[in-house]
Structures are given as structure tokens and as C-alpha cells.
Image (cartoon, rainbow, N blue to C red):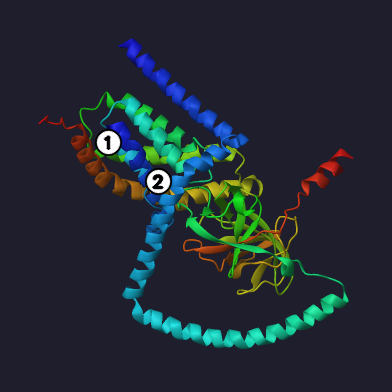
Amino acid sequence: MRNFRSSRWVFLGVVLLISFGLITASQLGVLGPLRGIAAAPLNLLTGIFNRIGLALTSGGEGLADLATLQRRNADLEEALARFQSELVELREIASDYTRLSQLLDYTSNTRDQEFIAAEVIALSDPNAPLRTIVINRGGRDGLAVGMPVVTGQGLVGRILNITANASRVLLVSDPSSAISARLQTSRVEGSVIGQAGGDLLMTFIPLDAQVQEGDLVITSGLGGNLPSDIVIGQVTSVRQLEFELFQQAVVRSLNNFDTLEIVLVVTNFQPVDLSVFEQATTGN
Amino acid sequence: MSNFLSVPLLALAAALQVSLAPYISILGGTPDLVLLLVVAWSLNVPLEQGILWAVIGGLCKDLLSAAPLGTSNIGMVLLLSFVSLVRQQLYSVGVFTLVWVIMLGTVMQFGTTLLILFTSGFQPAFGSQLGYNVVFLEISTILLPTIVYNLIGIFPMYWLVRRLQRTSNRPRRLS
């Protein structure tokens, strides 16, 4: 009986040892190719369920609330007409900008951006501490860790890790994500960090800066991790406490991360590792 | 037979967890299907079989997340070992057993995963003060709703698993 019990504990110890071994091997990147192969059938299964989920939710909503959809359609048509007139105006400004840029021999980074479109095959698990999505493009398509991922509505996140035919993207709404940002109108700098609830928080805004609800927040490009001038979101509220050194703004991304279907990966942006300069300064 | 069932069932649960669960998410939480399945299955089988299910379930979960492989195993294996120790005192599995096992399992799974992720370098961006804040937010927005969902989900899952176990263990008559 005692032998039976002790053999159980030995079995348990071996399992725990193997689990810790797997974690260490994962951290060292030894399991990368094996993980990609093992995850392939699960990704396929997830992709099928994801399509079913999207079809069910879109179909159900459409049938359930036809009147709301009609009203929304009218609102969107009105907004489209307004945006089209704004687009003409902005195109004029853009052509002026191009001429001035050529005179100054200055080329904007964003104009040189190259994209690869990718389909979202797995959404973020709400139970997981990390908020990530999986896309169906990987190393075989020329993607690399750190590449920015965007949609027409703005920044989605950065590539965290890749396999041959899929990549995992760390969303901007993840609590471990921090992005150098600026307010588009006042050009005030700050940092946008993800919140556990899915919102974004812009911190380190100077107390004297004017921040208003509705201000657009864009990437500043500082730190070299992301290109500048990508829309992150819109300010929904501002917190200014007398005893704090900085004010904070709650930012809402224009992307709905729970219903992403297609994203764009910026393939020609290379993140810059500025830690080299910090080490050089410390060394001196 | 039971061991052969583990891979397709747990892969299916993990895939459903990642793809369909976000659509039924309320207040940030969803039922942890893999944990529910492992707990429901393990309550009436030997510890070794339960641990096998926990390892396969954990690997399926980790393959579909950014966590290092093996992260989800630890919490479930520790839970099953503790349950195995306590189970010797129990006459049968009742409502109370299901409630405390799933509550403890959810907390252990969440705690070990968070601990392993933090020690692996996935830390909040700015300073310790904000770090504690993030942990508190994770608990209030993810752990508590997940406990509620798992408490609701364990009863139908246990009923389904018991039916499946009885069917798979039924002796077959030779013609």
C-alpha cells in the first residue's frame, strides 16, 4: 500500500518536473518549430469555430434588430456623405503637403509603408491574462516579431511570436503593452497602456496640457518600436487629480478587438533597439 | 478507451474556448471549458488518469495561447493531487464537492498561470504600483466572473461526463 502511494507521488513529481521543463524549453525557444506543428490542427479547428461564431452573431443580430440596422444605415450614409466632402478637402491638403515635402527633401515614413493582409483565425481568450489574436500569416510570408499590425480604424498591436504559417499578435489593450503616443491636436506626448478591462489609458500627460474628450491619440514613434502617426484611439474621459504629477486620459480604440476579421501587417518597418545606447551610456 | 477520448475532447474544448467563448463573454468572463472537463472527468477516475487529462488539456490550452507550454498543466495537476488526498475522506461526489473543487481549481489555475507568466517576463509595463493595480484588475475583471461561470458550468459538464464515462466503461457483449 505504501509502495503504491509513494509510486503515485513519484509519478506526480515526474509530471510536474516535465511541465517545468516544458516551460523552460518554451522560454529558451527550443520548442518553436514543434509548437507550430502541434498547434496547426488546433488553429484549423479554431478557425472553423471562429467563422461559425461570426456567422451566428452577425445573422442573429441582423434578424433581432432590423429597425436599429435601418436607422444605423441612414446614419452611416449621412456620415459617409460628410466624410466624402472632408476627404476632398483633405486630399487638397495632402497634395499641398506633398509639394512642400518635396521642397524640403523630406519623405514621410507612412507613405512608404508596405502591408500584407491577414485573416484573424483566433480571437483573444477573455480568461487568459494575455490579450492576443492569431493571424494566418507567418514567417513564410516574410513576417517578423515586432511588426506593427493595423486596420483601417488604427493600431491593433505588435507581432509577439511567429510560426511558419501563423503569427500571434499582442493587442494594444493587453496590460503588458505600452506605446509612446501623442494627442493629434495639441501634440502632447504620453504613453498608452492596456487595461485589464480592455480599455486603454494614456498616462504621463503634463498637468498643463489641454486634453479634451474626442481628441485623437496617435503613435509618436518615440522609442523606435512603432512608426509614427498611426491612430490608437479617441479620448473618452480625462482624469486630473491635484496631488498627481501627471493627468491621465481614458482612450477607446476605434477597433473592436472581439470581432476582428482582417488586419494589415506593416512589413517594411524594422523596430529599433534603443537599449544599445543605454548600455553604451552605462558603460561610459 | 477513456484515455483515447481525452485528446479529441480536450482539443475540442480548447478550440471552443478560444473561438466561441469570446462571443458569450459577459463582464469579461467565460467558462473555462478545459478546466471544467478535466475536473468533471477526474473526480471519478484514478489519479493517474486524471493527471493525464490535465496534462493534455493544459497543453491544448497553451498551444492556443501565448503562454509557455506547460503553464496551464501546473495548476490543474496540483489541484487533482490535492483532491485525490481529500477524496479518500469522501463517500461520494456531491454538489458541495463540485462547488469547492471548481472554485479552488479556478483560483489555482489563475494564480499559477499569472505567477508563471510574471516570472517568465510578461510583466506590467510601469513600476510595481501599477503592477499591483493590474493584478487587482485581473482578479476583479477576469477571475471573479470566471468563478461564477465555472460554478454554473460544472453541473451540466459533470452530468455529461458521467454519462460518457458510463457509456465508455460499459462492457460490450460479444455476438
> Identity of the amino acid at label 1?
Thr
Q: Chain of mark 2?
A: B
Position of residue A67 measured from the top left corner of the image (x, y, whole percent): 35, 82
- Which of label 2 and label 1 is nearer to you? 2
Q: Is B82 above or below relative to A48?
A: above
Position of residue A256 measured from the top left corner of the image (x, y, whole percent): 51, 65
Name the residue: 34% across, 50% down.
B149
Q: Is B13 above or below relative to B112?
A: below
Q: CA distance from mark 2 to mark 1?
A: 24 Å
- Left or right of A18 on screen, residue B130: right
Position of residue B130 measured from the top left corner of the image (x, y, whole percent): 61, 50
Judging depth in this view, the residue of A131 and B53 nearest the camera is B53
Instruction: Name the residue furthest right.
Output: A284
Name the residue: 58% across, 87% down.
A82
Judging depth in this view, the residue of A18 and A175 nearest the camera is A18
Q: Earlier in the sequence, mark 2 or mark 1?
A: 2
Secondary element type, mark 1? helix
Position of residue A280 measured from the top left corner of the image (x, y, whole percent): 85, 42
Name the residue that disc number 1 marks.
B97
Q: Chain of mark 1?
A: B
- Left or right of B172 on screen, residue A259: right
Instruction: Name the residue furthest front.
Output: B175
Name the residue that disc number 2 marks.
B14
